[in-house]
Image: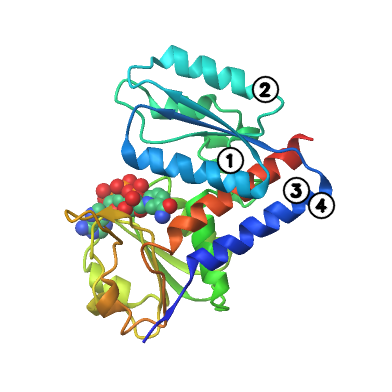
């Protein structure tokens, strides 16, 4: 039976470190969160980010814009936030309504305030291993892997998913720690066979119960990034938890695994941004 990797505990420890450093060094840090439209899931994320800011002693500025916001209005707000000395980090909650060009919006954020690390400058820096911020979800997954005490070095690592937000940067972080990394996607042949090679398996697919026990090596570390809402309203990951937990060595639950880590790393990145901008 797998040991459960407790994302709530690991994320709480990170937030406490951020809170203690802010209090100890009298650091003034501010995070602006921009939300456009009425997506209920985005609303929940934004509220959680606000709560985490309060806990850490980070000032939070929330900008809730209407669904019909234009590109010009959003870019003007980002310019204002880029120039606001009280704002150290800017986060635009994705997805954005259709009329807004996500790529152009991300590129408008000052790379020094891009606490999500989505700006191409920061993506490039991550690629060459010279970065200030790491993208929140993959960095959170790395913290969870570290919490097992298992070293990534030399391990077979398989990441399912190649999005710019999760899959690709996740693979890069595993590579930085000397894992032997394979990235899988919808065109991968013999996916189960590739996954069975993994000492560390990261699922970022967005399909409920996609990873089954026959895809998992005995004793593997399984990190489930997926957040899927079932018809009955319950959240579930990409990994079929009941059967995979019988076979894996370590596993993250959903909820309570990767989810809380993303926000904890966001707090850490905002503190880093405040220190860099000082
Ligand atoms: P995307 O939809 O952008 O990417 C999904 C990836 O899965 C794609 O690369 C796709 O391949 C691949 N894929 C889809 N079907 C298959 C298949 N049958 N076999 C192999 N690969 C497949 O999703 P994201 O990366 O943005 O998110 C992934 C999941 O993680 C979602 O559930 C999301 O909600 C969750 N998430 C959780 C976060 C957290 O804080 N815990 C934060 C961000 C995301 P292809 O490229 O070929 O289409």
Query: Quick one: label 2 or label 1, which is nearer the N terminus?
Result: 2
**Near-viewer residue (267 or 106):** 267
Under circle 3, the secondary element is helix
Q: Which residue is farthest right?
A: 25
Q: Find the distance from the CA under tag 4 to the CA under tag 2.
A: 24 Å
Residue with the mark numbered 2: 84
Q: Find the distance from the CA under tag 3 to the CA under tag 1.
A: 17 Å
Q: Find the distance from the CA under tag 4 to the CA under tag 3.
A: 6 Å
Residue 23 drawn at (x, y percent): 77, 49
In the rendered image, which quarter contains the N terminus?
bottom left
Q: Find the distance from the CA under tag 4 to the CA under tag 1.
A: 22 Å
Residue with the mark numbered 1: 115
For the point 33% across and 57% down, the residue is 226
Under circle 4, the secondary element is helix
For the point 53% across and 63% down, the residue is 142
Eye-nearest disc, 2 or 1: 2
In-image side of 249 versus 32 (left or right):
left
In-image side of 78 versus 259 (left or right):
right
Query: Quick one: label 2 or label 3, which is nearer the N terminus?
Result: 3
């Amino acid at each position: 039976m797998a040991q459960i990797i407790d994302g709530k505990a690991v994320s709480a420890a990170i937030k406490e470190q951020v809170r203690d450093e802010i209090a100890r060094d009298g650091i003034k840090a501010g995070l602006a969160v921009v939300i456009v439209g009425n997506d209920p899931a985005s609303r929940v994320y934004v509220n959680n980010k606000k709560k985490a800011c309060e806990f850490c002693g980070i000032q939070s500025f929330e900008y809730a814009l209407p669904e019909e916001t234009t590109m010009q209005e959003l870019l003007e707000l980002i310019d204002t936030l880029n120039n606001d000395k009280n704002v150290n980090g800017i986060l635009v909650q994705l997805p954005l309504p259709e009329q807004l060009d996500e790529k152009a919006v991300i590129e408008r954020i000052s790379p020094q305030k891009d606490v999500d690390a989505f700006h191409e400058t920061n993506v490039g820096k991550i690629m060459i291993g010279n970065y200030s911020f790491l993208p929140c979800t993959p960095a959170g997954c790395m913290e969870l892997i570290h919490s097992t005490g298992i070293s990534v070095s030399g391990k077979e690592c398989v990441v399912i998913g190649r999005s710019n937000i999760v899959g690709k940067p996740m693979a890069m972080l595993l590579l930085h720690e000397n894992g032997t990394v394979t990235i899988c996607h919808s065109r991968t042949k013999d996916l189960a066979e590739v996954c069975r090679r993994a000492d560390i398996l990261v699922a970022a697919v967005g399909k409920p119960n996609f990873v089954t026990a026959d895809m998992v090596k005995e004793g593997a570390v399984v990190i489930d990034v997926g957040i899927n809402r079932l018809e009955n309203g319950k959240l579930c990951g990409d990994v079929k938890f009941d059967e995979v937990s019988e076979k894996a060595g370590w596993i993250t639950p959903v909820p309570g695994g990767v989810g809380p880590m993303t926000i904890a790393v966001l707090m850490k990145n905002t503190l880093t941004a405040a220190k860099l901008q000082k």
